[in-house]
Amino acid sequence: MWPFDKNNEEPEQKLSLQHHNHLIVASMSKSLVTIEFDTQGHIQNASPLFLQAMGYQLEELMGKHHRIFCDKSYTQSADYTQFWQSLARGEVKSGTFERYSKTGDLVIIEATYFPIFDDTGSVKSVMKIASDVTEKVKKAQADKDLITALHQNFAVIEFQPDGTILDANKNFLSGLGYAIEQVQGQHHRMFCFDDFYQENPNFWRELAQGRAFSGRFLRKTSYGEELWIQASYSPVRNEKGEVYKVVKFASDITDDVNREMAISEAANIAYSTALQTSQVAQEGNQVLHDTVGISQRMMDNLTVSISQVEELASLSDDVSEIVKTIGSIAEQTNLLALNAAIEAARAGDQGRGFAVVADEVRKLASRTSESTEEITQVVNKNMSLTKEVTQAMNDVNYVAQEASGKIQTVSETMDEIYTGAESVASAVNSFKGKES
């Protein structure tokens, strides 16, 4: 081989390598988001994908400075100056960066800035290869914000699939009265009363198999007090679909449950009271109906008695008339006896026997007259008493009628109470059914 032939091969190899590198760069420009700067940060070239992502035409960018993609306050900072000084020295910069498109929209990129050296080893330019992760970062931020919101508003605790506690947030720890050191590595049963695992022996086995649970649960604080929670136990799977942990989100509903229990107890009392009221009203109504019947019979009897007393008064009037007649006859008899005695005296001895008879007749008439006076007094007194009794019985009858009317009114009121109590009982029972 001749020496000049060897010397001629080196330029050819360099040209071949340069051509190869040019092909690589051209291929990268077509397939990747790339942009090239000089060492001061002025744009020398940009790939179509970069131009598409940022909304520019190439001629709009040529010769412009990198700062057109950045927040103004950042470009005026010492950090930005040092950033380009480091790149000019040949350092590589990688990371996530916030940039702005032509329309001012935020574009988040994951990028690497790396130097391109010339044959002398000096930095000729700076190439950036980037990928648009705006949606990815926004989604990650949204997920982070969601998790932050959940931790702010809920009690959160994480378990291994067997129920061993991994971690718990402040809301959970403060709600149950524990420090994180007291619960990490312990089992979920430390928060439960014995009857929970008696009723749910396969709770963690089913969670480990991927079944979620949600609902109301009664739990126990570090002080042994009851705590009602509304909670969801959610299995979390890895990329293989295997459950590797369980996350529980919970909120304290103890006050709500106690309020519901108080309402339920009040409803039970109201229902029981309504039933008792209904029964008492029904019984009282029956008693009133019976009382009305008795009052009616009393009034009927009083009416009959008044009629009989009035008839007795009428008979007393008749007796009085008869007594008057007897008294008149006695007076006439007495007068006749007196006349007979006078005539007997005139007759002398012949009239003595007749005089004796006349005297006896006169005495009999006198006694009859006295008796008729006594009978008259008795009859008059009887008539007076009869009038008083009649008036009293009329008063009693009036009072009885008035009482009967009032009892009837009370009976109707009791009917309304009974109907109302039945309605209340029905409404409360319906409410209890809906609550359960």
Image: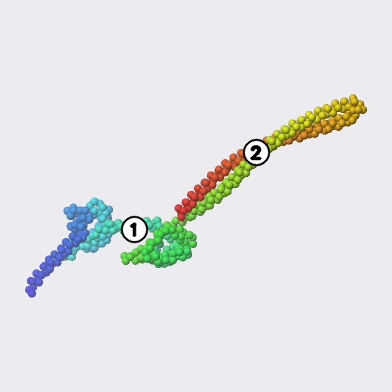
The picture places residue 368, in percent across and down from the top left corner, at: 81, 33
Residue 378: name its quadrant.
Answer: top right
**Secondary structure beneath label 2:** helix
Seen from this angle, which residue lies furthest front? 350
Q: What residue did someone put label 2 on?
A: 303
Q: Which circle, 1 or 2, is nearer the viewer?
A: 2
- At x 38% / y 58%, what residue is drawn? 151
Q: Could you tell me the amino acid type at mark 2?
A: Thr
Q: Nearer the viewer, residue 143 or 397?
A: 397
- At x 59% / y 45%, what residue is drawn? 289
The picture places residue 208, in percent across and down from the top left corner, at: 38, 66
The picture places residue 107, in percent across and down from the top left corner, at: 26, 55
Crowding at dot 2, Cα within 10 Å, few <14 / some 14-19 / many 20+, comes out as some
Residue 197: name its quadrant.
Answer: bottom left
- At x 25% / y 51%, what residue is drawn? 104
**Is 383 displayed left or right of 428 in the figure?**
right
Identify the mark nearer the N-term, 1 or 2.
Answer: 1
**Is 231 displayed left or right of 28 in the figure?**
right
Residue 346: name its quadrant.
Answer: top right
Q: Nearer the viewer, residue 235 or 38?
A: 235
**Which of the image's four quarters has the N terminus?**
bottom left
The picture places residue 179, in percent across and down from the top left corner, at: 44, 62
Residue 255 can be seen in this image: no
Q: What's the distance in space between the residues labelled 1 and 2, CA to CA?
A: 96 Å
**Secondary structure beneath label 1:** helix
Seen from this angle, which residue lies furthest right? 349
Q: What residue did someone put label 1 on?
A: 144
**Is 18 displayed left or right of 273 in the figure?**
left
Seen from this angle, which residue lies furthest bottom? 1
